[in-house]
Amino acid sequence: MKRKPSINIRFAERKDLKFCGKTDFKHVSEEILERNIEERAIILAEVDRKPVGYLRVEYLWLKIPYVSLITVEKEYQRKGIGTAMIKFLEDYLIKNGHKVLYSSSQANEPEPQAWHRRVGFLECGYIAGINAGGIGEIFFKKSLEDHARSAC
């Protein structure tokens, strides 16, 4: 009988800096990642104690939570890990008084768009040509008030 892997979702710690730097595609400096870790802005997913997923949240205008990056290593995708990281973030945001969560996906990425819709995000906007190559960005919004009621 095959053993079910142990999945753990938690905030990143300083010891996770190397994985965070690798996962963030070197777009963010180590100094900023360290600050993000201190601010509880990076969530890590582990399978059998091995980091396999990463979520970074930023705050628009220092108050509106926005998922700026979520990624799961290829061999662990489609196993509920991204959804578990979103749920962990939602629980944290609700406890801290937030009522909404935003995210986005490039317009040429149908799979991430479908994933956002599956986990309860609704499309709420579009910015044309914001990414390299003139590719647009689709924005998503998720109400945390519905989530808070269903958690009771």
Image (spheres, rainbow, N blue to C red):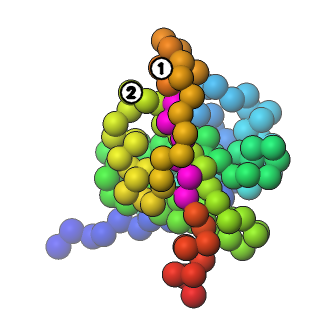
With 127 as the anchor, is 40 left or right in this view? right
Task: Name which residue type carries label 2.
Answer: Asn
Residue 68, image x, y percentages: 61, 41
Q: Quadrant of the C terminus?
A: bottom right
- Nearer the observer, 62 or 21: 62
Within the image, what quadrant is residue 47 found in?
bottom left
Which secondary structure type mostly characterizes the magenta part of the structure? strand
With 15 as the anchor, is 48 left or right in this view? left
Are the two marked residues, 2 and 1, in contact with CB atoms closer than 8 angstroms? yes
* Residue at the image point whose x is 62% and y is 34% from the top: 21
Q: Which residues are magenta?
A: 137-142
Residues under labels 2 and 1: Cα distance? 7 Å
Residue 77, image x, y percentages: 34, 49
In this rendering, is residue 3 above or below 23?
Answer: below
Residue 33, image x, y percentages: 73, 39
Q: Quadrant of the N terminus?
A: bottom left
Q: Is residue 140 magenta?
A: yes
Residue 136 visible, this orientation: yes
Residue 52 visible, this orientation: no
> Which residue corresponds to mark 1?
135
In this rendering, is residue 17 above or below 47?
Answer: above
Within the image, what quadrant is residue 91 found in?
bottom right
Q: Which mark is residue 108?
A: 2
Q: Which mark is residue 10?
A: none
With 40 as the anchor, is 43 left or right in this view? left
In this rendering, is residue 17 above or below 80?
Answer: above
Task: Name which residue type carries label 1.
Answer: Ile
Mark 1 crowdedness (10 Å alpha carbons): few <14, some 14-19, many ≥20: few
* Residue at the image point whose x is 62% and y is 25% from the top: 26
Residue 71, image x, y percentages: 48, 43
